[in-house]
Amino acid sequence: RDCSQMVCPSSSAWVDFPTDNATAHAEFTECSNMGVCDRTTGICNCRSGFEGPACDTMICPIGELTSSIPEGTGIMGVCSGNGRCMSLRDVT
């Protein structure tokens, strides 16, 4: 093993192959299988749509608020005011 290379943060995998009938989403997967580890810096380069040290949070869309104010006002908010951002850790 080459110990000169950095290791990136890990979290539950967003996408993974099941290892048993009731087991999937391996824990402690580098960059949560949604990024590529830069071995020189130890920082995950996340795929589009993901963020966080281990790429474990989906980027929440920003859009015009539709649930709490009349349409057409141009006021922007996370998830257009129709939900909340959650990491995979929050969901599981």
Image (cartoon, rainbow, N blue to C red):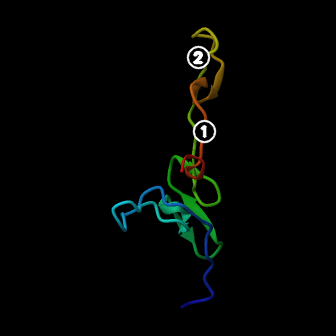
Pick the front one: 3 or 91: 91
50 in relation to 10, above or below: above
Where residue 83 appears, as percent x and y from the top left, is: 58, 30
Under circle 1, the secondary element is loop
Q: Is residue 24 found left or right of 56 in the rendered image? A: left
Q: Amino acid at mark 1?
A: Cys
Which residue appears at 45% of the width and 60% of the height? 25
Residue linked to disc 2: 67
Q: Is residue 80 found left or right of 34 in the rendered image? A: right
- Rate crowding at label 1 as few (under 14), some (14 to 19) or many (20 or more) other CA atoms within 10 Å: few
Residue linked to disc 1: 85
Which residue appears at 38% of the width and 60% of the height? 22
Give the CA distance from mark 1 to mark 2: 16 Å
Where residue 8 appears, as percent x and y from the top left, is: 61, 70
Q: Amino acid at mark 2?
A: Ser
Where residue 16 appears, as percent x and y from the top left, is: 40, 62
Where residue 17 appears, as percent x and y from the top left, is: 36, 64
64 in relation to 16, above or below: above
Pick the front one: 2 or 32: 32
Quarter of the image with the N terminus is bottom right
